[in-house]
Structures are given as C-alpha cells and as structure tokens.
Amino acid sequence: MNQSKENDNLKLYDQVFSSRLLVGTALYPSPAIMAEAISASGSEMITLSLRRQDPENNQGQSIWQHIQQSDCALLPNTAGCHSAQEAITLAQMSREMFNTDFIKLEVIGDDYNLQPDPFETVKAAEILIKQGFKVLPYCTDDLVLCQRLLDAGCQVLMPWGSPIGTGKGLMNPYNLQAIRDRFPTTSLIIDAGIGKPSQAMAAMEMGFDGILLNTAIARAHSPIQMAQAFAQAVNGGRQAYLAGLMESRQTASPSTPILGTPFWQQQ
C-alpha cells in the first residue's frame, strides 16, 4: 500500500485526525496525571462517560476541567449499559451534556468477560444512526456482526482485541485480519484488550486504522511515559503497514546476493 505520510489521517465520519491513538480518561492516579498522559499520547480524541458524582467530592469537576483544557474531541461512551434502550438514553444525555454527536456504543451482554451483546448493539446502532449520532460501536471480532453494523449505517467499527482490561492483546488475529480484508475502506479501530505497545503495533501493521485504550496507560507505573510509548508504537506500526511488510517464508534466503561475488578455492 502506498500513501503519502502527509495525507495519511484518520477519518471518523466527517472529522479527520492526525493521531491514530484514542485514549480513555478513567483509572488514572489523579486528574493532573491524566491530563499529562493525554498530552503525551498526542491523542486528539478522548473517551469519557457520564457518572453520578458525590456532591462532596470535587474530583469529578477537576477531571472535567482538565478534559476541557486538553482541547481534544470528545467521545462519550455508554459503558455499563445492558440494553439498547439504556444505551440510547445515555447517548441522548451525553449529546446534551457534551455537545457532540459522537458516541462510543457499548451494550454489555456478559458481566464476566464484558462481551458486548451483538443483538442489542445492532438495535441501538440502528436507532442512534437515525437520530443523527456518529456511532462508533464496540463489538467482538465477528465478521457477520460487523456487516450488520455497517448495514445499520455505522461508518466506523471497533472490534475488540480481547476482553476489556485483560491486556491479552490480539486473541484472534485471523478473525481481525478477515474483518480488515473484508471491509478495506471502513475505518477500523481496535478497542479493548491492548496491554502493550507491541500489541498496538501488531494491530497497526495488520492495517487497522487506530487503537483505543485506557487501562494500559492509566495503570502503568508511569502513565506519561507509557502514553509516549503507545504513541510511538501506533505511528511505527502504521508506517510499517504503509511501507509494505516483508512476507514470511518457509526457507532461508540470503540478504547478500551470491551472483557476481568472488570465491576462493584452496589449491
């Protein structure tokens, strides 16, 4: 694949981003560290969710102030929802609160591995798209489910690499590659399960368009340094994909040509 670096941007619906790393805003040791990590990541879009705040606890307000100062585009999510209607209601509240049509759609079907409910996710996506939302659905690496979400009107898909918070990376590379190959013009972002920069790079080398993560940065010993590492990995993986990766072989092949080189024979 040949594409100039200058024109190589991430397109999500009608918005274009130079960074292909999206980061979350939860689990950080403090709002200040969260803000520094976001800056270090180079991310231009961050996820956040509505939460009931204790009036006596000012941390929620502090987090919001740092988010506003980041100047990043907001991607509210429907984390914690278990039905289409619940997700739709939260999306409507998020649009009113955060003044954005973007929504990360999560409808959880299993509380053990936090696997999304495919049926409720498609149902919610269909309704939200009709209401003018720019839906980024969190889904499994199921090819048929991805097709149904595209049929519903989604222009971006976010299949998991592995269950949320596990850090197991790309559990089913074959499934993910099949999705990439089947939908070559769709913006695809790996969401969930990425625990190491090397895993993010592997996804980008496969041709995925971006990475969304939270825990791996927020829970690192140094979130700021880890954010920088992920930014470099995402950029490196993307450039490797654009350059064209070497195909693996079953047999050895010399890197130095033999033809035309001198040889000596002992007399």
Image: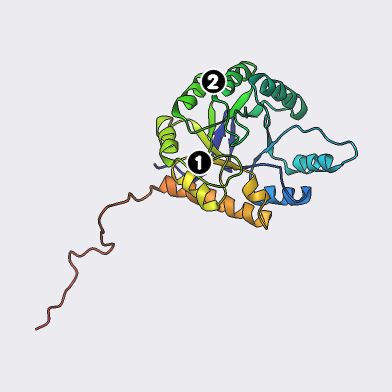
Q: How far across and how far down the image is residue 15, in percent?
A: 60, 32
| Residue holding disc 1 | 8
Tell me which amino acid carries mark 1.
Asp
Residue 81 or residue 228, whichever sits in front = 81
Under tag 2, what secondary structure? loop
Report the residue at 45% width, 31% height from top.
185
- Where 93 falls versus 267 (above or below)? above
Report the residue at 17% width, 66% height from top.
260
Residue 71 or residue 47, whichever sits in front = 47
Horizontally, is 49 left or right of 112 in the view?
right
Q: How far across and how far down the image is residue 248, in percent?
A: 32, 51
Residue 235 visible, this angle = no
Residue positioned most to the front: 112
- Where 28 falls versus 140 (above or below)? below
Report the residue at 61% width, 20% height from top.
124
Horizontally, is 164 left or right of 182 in the view?
right
| Residue holding disc 2 | 153
Quarter of the figure that contains the C terminus:
bottom left
Mark 1 / mark 2, whichever is N-terminal: 1
Tell me which amino acid carries mark 2.
Gly
Residue 67 visible, this angle = yes
Under tag 1, what secondary structure? loop
Picture quadrant where residue 139 is located: top right
Q: How far across and how far down the image is residue 37, in percent?
A: 69, 51
